Image (cartoon, rainbow, N blue to C red):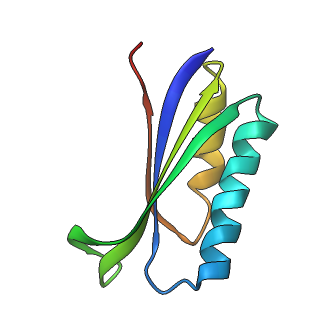
Amino acid sequence: MNKYELAVILNVNLEEEARTATIEKVKGYITRFGGTVTEVDDWGKKRLAYEIQKSKEAFYYFIKFESNSECPNEVEARVRLMENVVRYLVVKQEA
């Protein structure tokens, strides 16, 4: 099992319920493809380095999980299609 971290940046116009539902959906994708979520870190609303979709702010979430090497690819493929997600990035953590 490898350790990964998924950074998810959500649209600033989302309500609390929609943000929670989106993060739960992402966590569901991780568990569906054989991963185990170990930590979810909510950074809240932060200023973006540059304007994305005419927004200067967004909500940041960092999800740490353990899985085999195929899970991150499957999760990225699903997260890419989610309309509430502005940006995402999966990074393998070094041991």
In the figure, 56 relative to 2: above or below?
below
Quadrant of res 48: bottom left
82 vs 36, nearest the viewer: 36
Count of picture labels:
0
Percent position of residue 93, x then y: 42, 24
Quadrant of res 53: bottom left
In the figure, 78 relative to 73: above or below?
below
Percent position of residue 72, x then y: 59, 33
Q: Residue at x 67, y 80 (%)?
A: 17
Residue 82 is left or right of residue 4, and the answer is right
In the figure, 75 relative to 19: above or below?
above
Tell which residue pokes out farthest to the left in this image. 49
Percent position of residue 51, x then y: 24, 75
Q: Residue at x 81, y 39 (%)?
A: 32
Q: Residue at x 69, y 49 (%)?
A: 27
Tell which residue pokes out farthest to the right in this image. 32
The quadrant of the rendering that contains the N terminus is top right
Q: Residue at x 70, y 40 (%)?
A: 30
In the figure, 35 relative to 88: above or below?
above
The quadrant of the rendering that contains the C terminus is top left
67 vs 81, nearest the viewer: 67
